[in-house]
Image: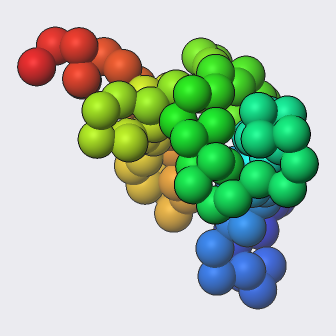
Amino acid sequence: MEATLAEAGEAKPKRNYAVNAYDSTCLLLAAIKDASTVSKGYPSRRDVLAAVRDIRFKGIAYREPVRWDEKGDNLAAVTALNGVENGRFRQIAEIQQMQSVEQT
C-alpha cells in the first residue's frame, strides 16, 4: 500500500516545481545569450528583459511554447484543478491560460 505524502513525511510534493525551475533557468540563459548577441557584449538588465519578452521558448513544463501577453503573463501556463479522493490528490482538469485569455 502506498503511503500518503503526510505519512511519508513530505509536506508538499517538491518535484512538481522542478520542471518549471528547469525551464525558467533554460529560458533565462537563452535570453541572456540573445541579449548579449544583440548588444555585442555584456547585456544590461534592460537588454535581458527585452530578450525575455521576445523569446518563444519550448521547454518541458508546458505543451505550448512560452510567450507573453501585453501584461507579461505567460500564455503557455496551465492551472491544474485537483480534488481529494480517498485522502489523495487527484487531478480533475487542466485549464490552459491561452484558452482563458482568448475567450475574454
Q: Residue furthest left?
A: 104
Quarter occupied by residue 95: top left
In the displayed structure image, the side of residue 11 where residue 83 appears, left or right: left
In the displayed structure image, the side of residue 1 where residue 20 appears, left or right: left
Q: Residue at 64%, 27% (x, y): give it.
A: 55
User: In the figure, 79 relative to 103: above or below?
Assistant: below
Q: Residue at 64%, 61% (x, y): give it.
A: 45
Q: Residue at 85%, 56% (x, y): give it.
A: 42
Colour mode of the rendering: rainbow
User: In the figure, 87 relative to 98: above or below?
Assistant: below
In the displayed structure image, the side of residue 84 where residue 103 appears, left or right: left
Quarter the N terminus occupies: bottom right
Q: Residue at 73%, 80% (x, y): give it.
A: 10
Q: Where is residue 62 drawn, in percent x and y? A: 63, 28
Q: Residue furthest front?
A: 40
Q: Where is residue 79 drawn, in percent x and y? A: 42, 40
Quarter occupied by residue 7: bottom right
